[in-house]
Amino acid sequence: MSKPLIIIPTYNELENIGNIIPRLLELPIGANILVVDDSSPDGTGDAVLSFKETERVHLLSRPEKNGLGQAYVAGFGWALERPEFDPIIQMDADFSHDPDSVPALVEKLETHDFVIGSRYVVGVNVVNWPLHRLMLSWFANKYSKIVTGLPVEDATGGFKAFRRSALEKLDLSSIRSDGYSFQIEVTYKLYSANCSVTEVPIVFIDRHSGTSKMSRSIVWEAAWMVWHLRFPRLF
């Protein structure tokens, strides 16, 4: 695990990307960074290109906005085509995932195949969310745990680290989900492939800048996805 890669999906994250990249480059793990940008009209991609001289920052531009799940699928595919990258970390651009928590996730990969930065494994560690959104997220995780049987408290969390060997077990072409459901689907499929998982407690802080991409359709997709995963023959 000599060259970690951090994958960050973006759409209109100009206010955040120029700040989070330097923070990640300063981490002691010496990670590379891959930004998967959906042709953000605000110039996010151009901001990423300003860091190209470091040779540790990479940009994967997609022609249009096509969802968080497919952005990660594209990023995972890019990483798996390059055998030098291991482990692979996914996180948001908006500082809701603390860059300083990345080394703790990577450390746990010494004994597990993938690691979730968890908001709920030790109490509830979410800052600046309105109560209705917090309750929605908490109940969504309880619901997904009951239906799927996953042994985790934060299946919808987007802060994860993977051994390369774990991601190689995923059929990326079969993943079509987005948002919450994408996070659940990846966790479920890896766990079903006998990959060991653990959770590291984090404090999740609502985004510093920009606009949330959450929508009602993403919530409903997740609600149905857990049944599709658990009882595929019914669907």
Image: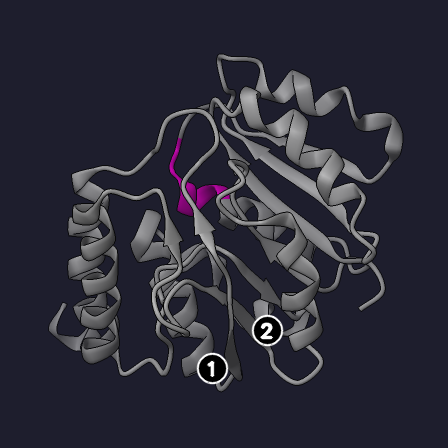
Report crowding for label 1: few under 14, some 14 to 19, many 20 or more residues within 10 A (C-alpha).
Answer: few
Amino acid bearing label 1: Ala
The C terminus: image quadrant = bottom left
Which percent across, then down, holds residue 81?
71, 53
* Residue located beneath label 1 in the image: 193
Q: Nearer the viewer, residue 121 or 187?
A: 121
Which percent across, then down, holds residue 151?
36, 83
Q: Considering the numbered disc 2 on the image, is that residue within a helix, a strand or a loop?
A: helix
Which percent across, then down, holds residue 109?
66, 76
- In terms of image quadrants, where is residue 59? top right
The N terminus: image quadrant = bottom right
Residue drawn at (25%, 52%) of the image: 134
Q: Considering the numbered disc 1 on the image, is that residue within a helix, a strand or a loop?
A: loop
- In terms of image quadrants, where is residue 155? bottom left
- In terms of image quadrants, where is residue 48? top right
Which colour scheme appears in the figure? one colour
Label 1 or label 2, whichever comes before in sequence order: 2
Most distant residue in the left direction:
234
Report crowding for label 2: few under 14, some 14 to 19, many 20 or more residues within 10 A (C-alpha).
Answer: some
Q: Which mark is residue 166?
A: 2
**Vertical placement of 21 versus 119: above or below?**
above
Residue drawn at (76%, 54%) of the image: 82
**Vertical placement of 195 versus 235: above or below?**
below
| Circles 1 and 2: CB atoms closer than 8 Å | yes
Magenta stretch: helix, strand or loop mostly: helix
Residue drawn at (41%, 62%) of the image: 119
Residue drawn at (60%, 51%) of the image: 77
Q: Is residue 179 left or right of residue 139?
A: right
Please give the range of residues in magenta. Answer: 66-71
Amino acid bearing label 2: Ala
Q: Is residue 168 visible?
A: yes
